[in-house]
Image (cartoon, grey):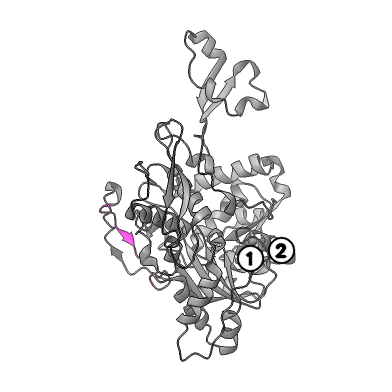
Amino acid sequence: MGRVDGYNQHNNRKDTAFTWTNVHNDLNLSSASDSSSNKNVTNESVGQPEGTNSTELSLSEHKFREFICGEEALIISPTEPYCLRRPIRRGHFNVSLHYPVQQVLEDLLTIWDWVLIEKLHIPHSERILYSAILVLPETFDNREIKEILSIVLRDLRFSSAVVHQEGLAAVFGNGLSTACVVNMGAQVTSVICIEDGVTLPNTEKTLPFGGEDISRCLLWTQRHHQTWPQIRTDILTKPVDLLMLNRLKESYCEIKEGQLDAVAVVHSYEDSGPGGTHKTRLTALNVPPMGLFYPTLLIPDVYPPPPRSWFNDSEDMLEDTWQSDGLYPGINVGLPLWESYPVFQIKPKKEEKVGIAEAITSSILLTGRIDLQRKLFCSIQLIGGVALTGGLVPAVEERVLHAIPSNEAIDTVEVLQSRTNPIFVSWKGGAILGVLDFGRDAWIHREDWIRNGIHIGSGRKYKDSYFLQAQAMCYINS
């Protein structure tokens, strides 16, 4: 339930000014039952007025909000006593020595429960009247999918649920049946081929970069050319700076020949004060998005990959069980908690440090049939926020064409124009799939899930299903 045709402001967000999130509740004890008691207070009422005593404060106390979700959480002043947690990072649960899996799951539950109540207005008592369609990225492991299903059915109390892959949903969302789907998100880019509504598992490619990496490259490029104002921009300790860079990237970065400059307003955010304004001329704005084709342009991630020990007993969403080759030392990036922490190797055969042109070409050629390859090279579908980058479509067509080996009998490459906003197309496709296959065996019912348990990797595998229900595991009667 929710809008899949939401208004997109992606190309109209040149304003990089943010206001610090108000982290207080106004709890007036004389009207505690008032529904407005949990609303934000105004900035003027946060502090204790001069001359007030404890008796007056007992009538109207200012308390911190228990939790803050979404973009609001990214613009909390560093002076406030909050800890920022990201349950999902680089296409996986963000499990680590300092972020245990139970906390990750609790945070996911908190976020989704908040969305259901505050945005969709579905209280707990009515959830049993709804079924949930889960559109999940190909990067998720089976155990991650199992835990998400448990949250949806056991904790959020939906009556039933079904899982669909994001790539497959995107194809249906655009009214297609065959395509090479390139999903360019904030932190991960994935490529997978679909033939006649069937996912081809061996064509999956995962690239460890996305829109946030382009934003970080934008900052690095400006500092390299000495066009960035003399301000303290720190995307590690101040997430609001990354939000600002994202806005600048969306507004000014595009793939274009020659020199690309623009006059922009940059903001600086320090402590709890208002943002400072700095008008400057940004340069080389066509360099950061070229990192999609030349990943060496993108600055190495400041964090190493999440530890994989939690997933060593699970199998991939599309493939048979894989085993880790062992441990290797964590990457020393100057962050004490990671310096000597052992990390499991993350599927080196799937995550590649190549550009999207090579990844698309490799993915399609893995299908092995020239007729299908020709069709897929003319049916490339770009989805995700990065797909809205100006000049990206002709750049993909040109570079994919040049990446095809000369001995292949293919001379045409085409990126299909999306009929739906690339940001929302997967959700639209998920809704369509949910209607098409409602009532089929792929739907998992709450009572069965809770009563009978699950068995990972048993009979009903995703790649064996003609209707492609992305059920990574199945439940059976005990």
Instruction: Label 1, secondary structure: give it.
Output: helix
Measured as percent of width and height from the top left, residue 418 is found at 64, 67
Measured as percent of width and height from the top left, residue 64 is found at 50, 28
Measured as percent of width and height from the top left, residue 186 is found at 49, 57
Q: Is residue 149 above or below residue 429?
A: above
Mark 2–mark 1 contact, CB under 8 Å? yes
Instruction: Label 2, secondary structure: give it.
Output: helix
Query: Who is closer to the viewer here, 122 or 399?
Result: 399
Q: Is residue 418 visible?
A: yes
Residue at image x 40%, y 42%?
Answer: 238
Residue 308 numbered tag: none
* Residue of label 1: 169
Q: Is residue 382 left or right of residue 292?
A: right
Amino acid on which disc 1 is placed:
Ala
Q: Which residues are magenta?
A: 339-348
Amino acid on which disc 2 is placed:
Ile
Measured as percent of width and height from the top left, residue 429 is found at 67, 63
Q: Residues within 10 Å of mark 1 (few under 14, many from 20)?
A: many
Q: Residues within 10 Å of mark 2 (few under 14, many from 20)?
A: some
Q: Is residue 348 above or below residue 72?
A: below
Specify the quadrant of the image occupied by residue 377: bottom right
Query: Who is closer to the viewer here, 304 or 6?
Result: 6
Secondary structure, magenta segment, majority class: loop
Q: Is residue 469 visible?
A: no
* Residue of label 2: 432
Query: Which callout, 2 or 1, points at the residue further toward the start of the chain?
Result: 1
